[in-house]
Image (spheres, rainbow, N blue to C red):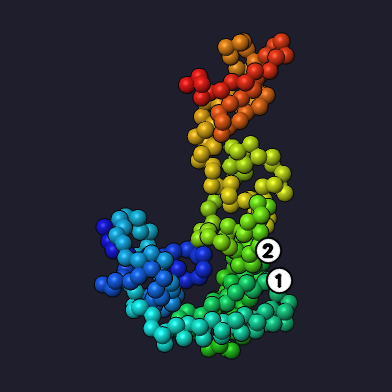
Amino acid sequence: MIEVIGVSFKKNSKIYYFSPNGLDIKKNSNVIVKTERGLQYGNVEKSNFNIDSKKLTTSLSEVVRIASKKDTEKHLKNQEDAKKALIKCRELVLKYNLNMYILEANYTFDRSQLLFTFLSESRVDFRKLAKDLANIYKTRIELRQVGVRDKAKEVGGFGSCGRELCCSKFLCDFDSVSINMAKNQNIALNPTKINGACGRLLCCLKYEDECYKECAKGLPKVGKKVETDEGIGKVISVDILKRKYKAELSDNRIIEVDLNESN
């Protein structure tokens, strides 16, 4: 077991683990930590706790210090400067007529790097853009292409359920979602029903997938012939969560079979 804290760098973003470096750090505190990109200012989502070292997929970096008032002021200044850099970058994109949309800009805490994330449907030659940005801001520039899900997370909005988009509300990571999940849940494969605001499959299809798989065990498929207490029938509908199905018998009678009772 190893002692760690959980830190995020943006609202509703992924939580990263860091060594508290002997410090007792409370939840919602702000800290300065070492990362691959340089020093970063983060918010503590989980205070000191122990975790199995085998669960760590990367090497553990350290907390440099608990953020001071001066650190917070510098962080806020970095955010303001990043907003200005975002506007300038978008102007240059228009100037060079590049097929890309700049989503956001972020400085590392020590301003050793300025990261721009962008959306594009194809590969983009942004070498001239990167060179101009480096000349303007005198720091290392990185332009990172992201997907439409990232754009939905950044822009926000409401889903077909009427609630705020999961990705902009609480999701930290984008899990893999497949069309089989919709099939498992007997959802009509209509793009307007199973696609989210980003145009990709709904993230919420993942939430109940394991539950549907478990409930579906032992249930026959629609169209399959089954033997019932009243004779051979053909399955015409299935209620997965209630673990029931309806079958049409040879005399055209329709019966309902409840697997909960048979078990």
- In the picture, the disc for residue 99 is 1
Q: Residue 229, percent across and down? A: 57, 12
Q: Residue 136, percent across and down? A: 59, 89
**Quadrant in which residue 130 is drawn:** bottom right
Q: What element carries label 1?
A: loop
Identify which residue is drawn at 63% across, 56% down.
163
Q: What element carries label 2?
A: loop
Mark 2 packing: few (<14 Cα in 10 Å), some, or many (20+)? Answer: few
Identify which residue is drawn at 38% across, 80% down.
67
* Residue contact at pointers 1 and 2, CB within 8 angstroms: yes
Work out whether mark 1 precedes mark 2 in sequence or the reverse, and give the earlier one.
1
When the figure is inspected, residue 32 is found, relative to residue 261, above or below; the finding is below
Question: How many numbered dots are placed on residues in this image?
Answer: 2
Closest to the observer: 263 or 116? 263
Identify which residue is drawn at 73% across, 77% down.
97
Identify which residue is drawn at 72% across, 49% down.
192
Q: Residue 6, percent across and down? A: 39, 65
Which residue carries the number 2 mark? 121
Closest to the observer: 52 or 146? 52
Question: Amino acid type of disc 1?
Answer: Asn
Question: Amino acid type of disc 2?
Answer: Glu
When the figure is inspected, residue 105 is found, relative to residue 243, above or below; the finding is below
Q: Is residue 205 visible?
A: yes
Q: Residue 94, percent across and down? A: 72, 79
**Quadrant in which residue 245 is drawn:** top right
In which quadrant of the rendered image does the N terminus lie?
bottom left
